[in-house]
Each structure stands twice: as structure tokens, then as C-alpha cells.
Image (cartoon, grey):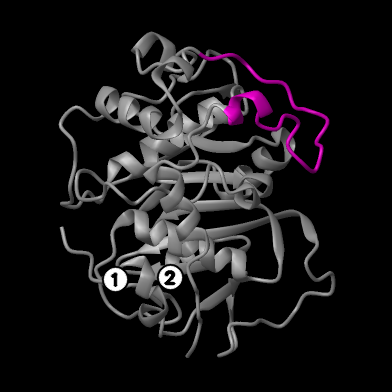
Amino acid sequence: MVHLCPWPILVVCLLFPVAYIATHKPKLLLPSGEMSRPSRNDLIQERSVLYLVQTEDGLTSTMRDALPDDALCISWKRPSPPCTFLPNSTWTEGRNALLLLAKSVPQKYTYYTFLDDDVTFTRQQYKQWQDFLFQYRPAVGTPFVPGHVWHAPPLPGVSVQTTKFFDAVMNAFHIDIVNGGLLLPYYDGEDDVSWWRSQICVVVLANILYPDQILQFNNLTISNKVHRQYPKEKFPRQSSQATCQAHFFKSKQTQSPSFSWDLEVVQNATAVDPPLSPLHLPVAPDAMLLGAFNFSSPFWRRTRAVLQSPLTLSS
């Protein structure tokens, strides 16, 4: 599969205006890539969310009006200002470009929500999504996607529960994860095999690094009705999990036994009570576990290279 916009020349591709979309009113980045600085520059704005939207040809007016906080967007099919144009990019490349754009913005946010442009809320809205994030402080937050075979079914009478799986269509990541350089960026080295694999590796790695900190908001449900043609695996769960874990660890003996795609385990969940709302995550990755990672593997080398890719924003 030929990628027309590989990361080493990302700087050439990002030559279209980028918008930093505040509530109902776009705020354009300056040609230098800098933005009018907030009054508390480089400080986390409490209860703030940055929405990172991947779109075919620009944000719809409906989504633009609905977003309650700031946003960045990328289009992949045609130039659609104020979105950044990343032509013929894969899903993984688009998500990573959004991550780099988000990290280039002086303003820091408590949560970064990635979502596709075809997300439709079928129960609740963005306000309730943000209330959930700031009340429960997950490492990774996900809405419930009815009908998805891998999503944990809601426990009766429970509004928030732990989960192992989270579909890529809409995820929120805490700033500690965005800055940590472990769970993100996405690995794009196997996009020619399947675009699902990058997300599955994030899911598996999240369960290794942040067990019991992946939370599903049962009272907020979404759907996405647009399904496009792209490389997919016929049996992605078992094959991708094994491949991802082989990327992470030094040997099979050190691979985490705590994660399984068995349906009973995937759907095993517990109810969650609100924490004391610390600004940072309550539990960081275990140092001994990190010592078992093979950071010289192609997976880790590639994700580090993505984080170090130059990103030049110009009009």
C-alpha cells in the first residue's frame, strides 16, 4: 500500500490553514504555527477538552455547532479550510497528525477527545460527555456503542463501569497519556495489513499500562453510520493482540497475561464510583512492567519517530 503522505514529509503536506475552533467561532492559527496565547499560558485549563476530528471533507455545520469546546480537524479527501489537509492519509496517520497538532498548541487541556466526523449521539450530548470525564477522571474514556460485539454490555443500573475494549470512533485521553509518549501515538507500521491494528494495539497497551482506568459511560451512546473501504483483518482480535504484545515486550515470558480477547473477559466489568477528582491520573504505569518492554523493537522506534516528526503549520 502506497502512502502518498508519509510522516517523513508531513511538513510538505500540512500546507493548508489550520483552525483552532473555539465554541461556534473559529480561531485561526497564525502562519508561524503559533496562536494567540491564553492568559495562563502552558498551564492546564481545568475542565477543558480539546476535540480532534478526522473528516473526509470538513466539519459539518451540525458538528461544528454542537462542539462545546475547542477543536482541531483534519480532512483527507479534499482541502476543506479551516481543517488541515492530509491527502490520501490512512486513519492512523490522520490520528497521529491530530495528536501532533494538539501538542503544538500552547494551551494545555485536561482531556483530548479523538472522534470521527460521522459520530452521532443517540443518547446524551457533549456536555454530559465532559461531565463524565471530569467527574470520574479516566485514563481513557469511551461512550457505549450499542450493537458493537466487543463493547462491554452496561451493567444494570450502572452509569459508569470499567471496560477493556474501546472502539476508535470516539475516545478521550487524559493529558498524562498525551504527554507520556507510551500509549500514544498510534503505530502506523502495519496499516498495509489492517487499519484496525493500530487501535487494537492502543487497546491492548492501555489495558497493560492503565488497568481499571479505562471507563465506559453507559448513559451516553453513539453510532457511526459511514463505513468505508480500507484494509481490514478477517479475524482481528486474536491475531492483532498477539502481534501487538510481541511488539511491546522483550520475550513471550514477560508478556502480560492479564489481557484476553475472550468474550467473557472482554465483557467483564465493575461499577465505578467517582474518585476524588485529582488533576493527574491516580496510578502511573508500573516501573517493573516498563522494564519488560523492548523499546528497541520496530513498534517503539516508530512511535518515537512519529513524536519527533517535524510539524510546520502555514497558511
x 31%, y 39%: residue: 197
Tell which of 69 and 92 is nearer to you: 92
* Horizontal arrangement in the rendering, residue 58 relative to residue 185 (left or right): left
Tell which of 180 and 127 is nearer to you: 180
* Horizontal arrangement in the rendering, residue 119 relative to residue 50 (left or right): left
Q: Determine the CA span between mark 1 and mark 2.
A: 28 Å
Categorize mark 2 by other alpha carbons within 10 Å: few (<14), some (14-19), many (20+): few
Categorize mark 1 by other alpha carbons within 10 Å: few (<14), some (14-19), many (20+): some
Kindly identify the amino acid type of the residue bearing the numbered disc 2.
Ser
- Find disc 1 in the rendering and name its residue: 5
Q: Can the viewer see residue 122 in this picture?
A: yes
Residue 115 magenta-highlighted: no
Of tags 1 and 2, the one toward the viewer is 1
What mark, if any, has residue 61 been given in the picture? 2
> What stretch of residues is rendered in magenta?
269-291
Q: Secondary structure at mark 1?
A: loop
